[in-house]
């Protein structure tokens, strides 16, 4: 009278739901694996939070020095104020270290000594000199005795304001403190 027994409708729905759920989970797993492979291969890059760099637009060096008997500054006529723009602007991470290499030629007949370096910025922000190479004080021999001059590498800590732009200033003193 009733023929072959058929599965009830709730059982069929349950099997269909399980089958669809299994296919969906497998599809999501395949998608995750493909995305991980693309990320590992560098094809897909996950956006991250990056801090804008600090821009150093130029370097101004001021040398505090005396004059030779002929009235010329010890380290040459261009030494009291120098503006370095070649190679600038530079972009560095906020609060990172930066170094500037300076060269000194002594045009006097006696040795003069580089005694201190102070750093600053325009606009004014705290800039700290962390070290110099060689360490100060540094004697600078007269140019005939030292044709290559004396290099001084000044290491500073850059201000930590992201996206800011500064002129880095260095004041190098060769005058003995009183």
Image: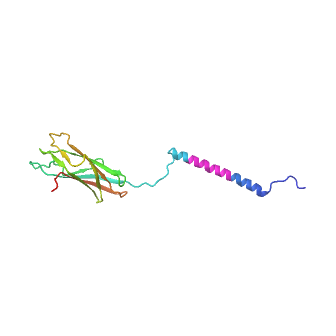
Work out which quarter of the rendered image holds the C terminus and state it. bottom left
Q: Quadrant of residue 107?
A: top left
Question: In the image, is residue 23 part of the stretch drawn in magenta?
Answer: yes
Residue at image position (56%, 48%) is: 35
Report x, y in % for residue 160: 35, 57
Badge count: 0
Q: Main secondary structure of the magenta part?
A: helix
Does residue 151 appear in the picture of this structure? yes
Is residue 94 toward the left or the right of residue 173 in the image? right
- The image quadrant where one finds the N terminus is bottom right
Residue 22: where, in percent of width, then height? 67, 51
**Residue 160 horizontal side relative to residue 43, left or right:** left
Which of 126 and 49 lies nearest the eye of the viewer?
126
Q: How is the image coloured?
A: rainbow
Q: In this orientation, does residue 75 appear? A: no
Residue at the farthest bottom position: 124
Picture residue at 21% right of the left edge, 43% below the top: 150
* Residue 61 rendering spot, x and y as whole percentages: 23, 52
Q: Quadrant of residue 140?
A: top left
Q: Residue furthest right?
A: 1
Verify whether residue 24 appears in magenta.
yes
**Which residue: 20% across, 51% down?**
115
Position of residue 16 in the picture relative to residue 86 (left or right):
right
Q: Position of residue 65 (x, y in %)?
A: 16, 52
Q: Which residues are magenta?
A: 21-35
- Name above or below for residue 164 compared with residue 149: below
Task: Judge left or right: residue 173 versus residue 33.
Answer: left
* Image quadrant where residue 145 sits: top left
């Amino acid at each position: 009278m009733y023929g072959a027994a058929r599965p009830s409708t709730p059982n069929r729905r349950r099997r269909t739901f399980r089958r669809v759920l299994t296919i969906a989970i497998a599809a999501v797993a395949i998608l995750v694996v493909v995305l991980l492979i693309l990320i590992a291969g560098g094809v897909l890059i996950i956006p991250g939070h990056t801090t804008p760099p600090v821009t150093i637009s130029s370097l101004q060096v001021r040398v505090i020095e005396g004059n030779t008997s002929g009235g010329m500054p010890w380290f040459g006529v261009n030494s009291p104020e120098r503006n370095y723009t070649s190679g600038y602007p530079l972009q560095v991470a906020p609060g990172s270290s930066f170094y500037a290499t300076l060269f000194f030629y002594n045009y006097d007949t006696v040795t003069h000594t580089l005694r201190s370096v102070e750093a600053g910025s325009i606009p004014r922000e705290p800039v700290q000199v962390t070290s110099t190479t060689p360490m100060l004080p540094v004697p600078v021999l007269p140019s005939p005795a030292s044709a290559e001059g004396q290099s001084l590498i000044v290491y500073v800590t850059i201000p930590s304001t992201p996206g800011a732009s500064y002129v880095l200033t260095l004041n190098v003193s060769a005058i003995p403190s009183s």
